[in-house]
Amino acid sequence: MNFLSYLIIGISLGSVYAIIALGYTMVYGIAKMLNFAHGDIIMIGAYVAFFALTRFGLSAIPATIGAIVICTLLGITVEKLAYKPLRSASSLAVLITAIGVSYFLQNGAQLVFGNDTKVFPNLTNNGAFSLFGGQLSISYVTLMTIAVCLLIMAGLVLFINHTKTGMAMRACSEDRDAARLMGINVDRTISITFAIGSGLAAIASMLLCMTYPSVYPMMGSMPGIKAFTAAVFGGIGSIPGALLGGILLGIIETLSKVYLSTQLSDAIVFSVLIVILLIRPTGLLGHKVNEKV
């Protein structure tokens, strides 16, 4: 039963990584850029939710909605001010800009909120669901995290495949110039992509804070890096790949901490990624794209 319990915890942690990885993989799939400021948007969402719960006395759902709205607006603003002017610039220029935006958000949070760690309120009273006569206990946060991840994944797949905006996103992903010639507003489509990714970051921040109840300016850095690793692991640009990569990464990290070493678990996670990329450079569900030059 212990192994099954650890496996479920790993799936729950991986579900958070998968939700964050969706933001990376959607932006890369459509805008062909790596938004390394994505992890810091998670941090902003956590602060918004924290103050909504503690200072304004809101319940969990209004606090989550507020975090989604603020993060969505922040994502759109960052895209308009920082990335849109570099639409035709080199990949290196965009990458450096993304790192600069990340540092700007981190230092801005330190100035506004301070460096001290804030304790996120307990929203579930540590409730748990018992199975097999109490031999297996699963927390409500774990179950909710997995359920939210699956709902988001199903909703995104339906949105991408069955809506006009989703079809525009797929067209931009294939060929932005051709999509523009067909009348698709590429800039608007990219902005919507950033909005969706940033909104998902806010949801991930709530789930993350409910699991690890600490809020501080650097809190989004490591989950952001691991979620990016999950996106690459599963095949960056692939939505199912983000889910698969995130869950596998969460399971590997959890089992590594339990059975091998807590100190070396992160190294093991990144080592597995290196091995996968050596064997399959496009990731588990990625596919090779041939370009004519």
Image: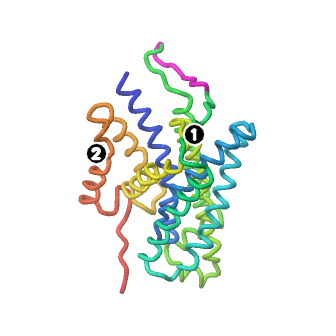
Task: Report the side of 248 relative to 179 (left or right).
Answer: left
**In the image shown, does 4 or 183 lie closer to the viewer?**
4
Q: Position of residue 63 (x, y in %)?
A: 69, 43
- Residue nearer the viewer, 74 or 197: 74
Kind of residue at badge 1: Lys
Residue 41 or residue 138, whichever sits in front: 41
Where residue 174 appears, x then y in whole percent?
49, 74
Q: Amino acid at mark 2?
A: Ile
Comparing labels 1 and 2, the label whose residue is closer to the camera? 1
The mark that comes first in sequence, 1 or 2, is 1
Pointer 1: what residue? 118
- Range drawn in magenta: 125-133
Describe residue 171's horizontal placement relative to residue 224 as left or right: right
Crowding near the residue tagged with mark 1, few <14, some 14–19, many ≥20 C-alpha atoms within 10 Å: some
Q: Is residue 241 visible?
A: no
In this picture, is 228 found above or below 17? below
Q: Is residue 78 magenta?
A: no
